[in-house]
Amino acid sequence: MTEQNIPYKIYLSENEIPKQWYNVRADMKQKPAPLANPATGEPLGFEELRPVFCDELIKQELDNDTAYIDIPQEIQDFYKMYRPAPLVRAYCLEKALDTPAKIYYKFEGNNTSGSHKLNSAIVQAYYAKQQGLKGVTTETGAGQWGTALSMACAYLGLDCRVYMVKVSYEQKPFRREVMRTYGASVVASPSMETEIGRKINAEHPGTTGSLGCAISEAVEVAVSNPGYRYVLGSVLNQVLLHQSVIGLEAKAALDKYGVTPDIIIGCAGGGSNLGGLISPFMGEKLRGEKDYRFIAVEPASCPSLTRGVFAYDFCDTGMICPLAKMYTLGSNFIPSANHAGGLRYHGMSPVVSQLYHDGYMEAVSVEQTAVFEAATKFARVEGILPAPESSHAIKAAIDEAMKCKETGEAKTILFGLTGTGYFDLVAYEKFNNKQMVDYIPTDEELQASFAKLPKF
Amino acid sequence: MTEQNIPYKIYLSENEIPKQWYNVRADMKQKPAPLANPATGEPLGFEELRPVFCDELIKQELDNDTAYIDIPQEIQDFYKMYRPAPLVRAYCLEKALDTPAKIYYKFEGNNTSGSHKLNSAIVQAYYAKQQGLKGVTTETGAGQWGTALSMACAYLGLDCRVYMVKVSYEQKPFRREVMRTYGASVVASPSMETEIGRKINAEHPGTTGSLGCAISEAVEVAVSNPGYRYVLGSVLNQVLLHQSVIGLEAKAALDKYGVTPDIIIGCAGGGSNLGGLISPFMGEKLRGEKDYRFIAVEPASCPSLTRGVFAYDFCDTGMICPLAKMYTLGSNFIPSANHAGGLRYHGMSPVVSQLYHDGYMEAVSVEQTAVFEAATKFARVEGILPAPESSHAIKAAIDEAMKCKETGEAKTILFGLTGTGYFDLVAYEKFNNKQMVDYIPTDEELQASFAKLPKF
């Protein structure tokens, strides 16, 4: 297969969309640690998780052994609405960088939620519907997850209640309106509808909310209303399983043209996009069939992998969720106002954390201004305005391509372009006006946060 | 070919992207009337148009005879960045409507400009670059055209100066930031940089501007700065030529599956998307090879085809541009604040006007609230948040599909989905809050406007 035969965009045909998800845990010798009870530190089983999560999703959460899980036909049909996502050969970026590197990116932004989140939203909504539930609750910060879940629920005719961090609710009215257009109820959090919301409003009058508080409200509503469950857009094992569709499609597209990547790069917030993208490649590495370099890219302002500790911690800042063993900055850690809202998470997927801990992947952290420089360069030559989150991966991919320029090596780089930046233009405006500020937490700040970790 | 073989989305392969544009004028017995000098009413020739437009584009504007025009390789390469655009079979919408009709739409929103405008922006920027010019100027209202032109200029390294109607500049800061991210200078119009801008600011202190004024400023800057020309995103013959790529791709995709549409529907503002979509089909009709029903859909608040007159009129409200013979509400007509900014134009492409005048197509007008009802229905089942402009076509397509449900006919409907609604969420918010207002101009208003038409 010659270079000339590789098109700008590789679209699989519809019948090549994966019909099974790949569960990378099946090939991990050291399995990710189970979710644990915050009171006792004991692993949480199926029955203990049932009041909060849908039954089938708990099974997927706990299943460390089944390598391939069938994708139900109705989800396959939904996937056809916006998948296959294109694998793009970044010819224009390569030319602009004058690098011998061959750069590919898997673009997940061509759907109205604007990101890869829809891949798991439809699955979680589907199993809720299958279980005969009335609806689901969730929280949203930047709004991508809430939008994706609203779309999935609208399609299936399921009630969708989104607790949106108050500051986002007020500052991101457009995201809110997309969710409302899809029929979701969007509530500013903290609200006066829940016990925890009323308590927080009483204790902190005028508070603009937090993701931790929104999670607490969403969970409270799910467990106290019959026919409702809570769903979460990242971090969990099940979410990484659903997102494996990204990596499976990317691999199938590359295989079609006989291309093997040397380096695979993804941005890392909760870890769902990264975990999904690398899954099938990581499987080959875990089974000793092939070797790849994997690079997780996180913001220097919220560096869980590069500067966090590997320990059991709360998944939420409100400390009502189970504990997960992961790289964490401590659930007390408040990330600075980094505009990549999707990466402002104190922890990291247990699967990604374990793989990183066991030396199967690398991690780098990058500063915001450099990320927006990379984003702008990319937008001008590749024609896609990238999300700030995705642009962390762009930055690292450009860095690797520039190393190739120095050494003359024609490495093949694959990165995940998780979404578009249409709802992030306040951040672009700051960058365009040269008002963007970089922030790196001090060692003292991190040590103070680590000191408050649960003692298990 | 059985029904089962038609996928949700038909993507042509890269080498099936059209390599020539189709010029429907070549097959029109009655050619569209030429642009005319507003002082004399005489047709404008090549030399008279040179100070304003690029040479090659003037040739395309005046060429009523060449049926196929080669697409330069560099433009073909740019097209590969975001084309082929998918032709989508609206299985989910058909199911939701429970109609025997088969509905297809050509989706042009999968690029950062969010609309079909990029198809012509890259061409106009390319010929400006070829001519050795430094840059181009233009006006933008809602911002889709300005964004598209910014992207094209960034790609080619051409200076881009956009005069943005002041009210949009202030109320649509996100659109403005996308253009700035692509390196364009965006100026609120009326500005203090031009003679006409200073004059209007002096006469109307605190004015929020108008499209007519922005056009005047952009033209003034183009003709008074060596190395600059003015470019326009719709109405002109050349723009319809470039947009024929929409119809050619749609037809190639349908032909591949042996599908012939019965009805072809497009929204109509200046006419570029509609003209581009219908071109190759209209060619067959004009040559007597096949028959199709064509429906132009316009807002009831700005009904140039359904309630306008066919006459020579100014293309701009500022009355500095040439005259075009077209269906018009009069260049004095001020459309109400209909949210489909791209359809708030008093006139209509001379090509579309002539075809409509000669009975080759139909036109309907629809009210805004009904359009947003259709948009919301579509978004929930097809997963794409449509632009308000595009949603006019959705409304008419749903109406035709519902007629099929009544009669039991399984007609095949093709419509153009020109773009996404990410930057139109103020309008969606109004609709979600049930605050949307419909407006239909009275006969008296229209007669008063017609009375001021130029006397040629």
Image (cartoon, coloured by chain):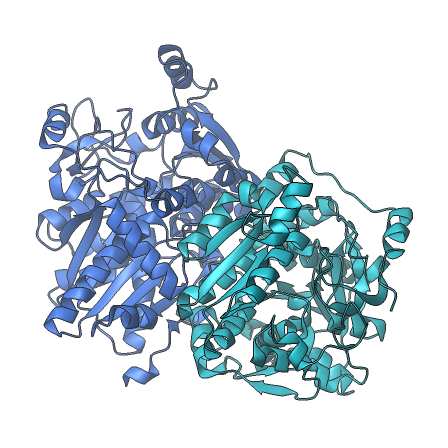
Chain colours: A blue, B cyan
Residue drawn at 86 percent across, 56 percent down: B452
Q: Is residue B322 left or right of residue B445?
A: left
Task: Locate residue A61: give its quadrant.
Answer: top left
Q: Is residue B232 left or right of residue B357?
A: left
Q: Quadrant of residue B431?
A: top right
How far across and down, in percent of the image, does residue B248 sit? Answer: 60, 78
Q: Quadrant of the N terminus of chain A?
A: bottom left
B375 relative to A322 in the view: left or right = right
A432 or B440: nearer the viewer = A432
Q: Nearer the viewer, residue A39 or B283?
A: B283
Q: Position of residue A326 (x, y in %)?
A: 17, 39
**Residue at 50% across / 32% down in the picture?**
A186
Residue at figure coordinates x 69%, y 66% from the top left: B271
Which residue does the image show at 64% across and 57% down from the upper left?
Answer: B216
Q: Is residue A380 visible?
A: yes
Residue B429 to residue B7: above or below? above
List x then y, in percent, for residue B168: 58, 45
Residue A241 appears at what percent x and percent y? 30, 52
Q: Is residue B90 visible?
A: no
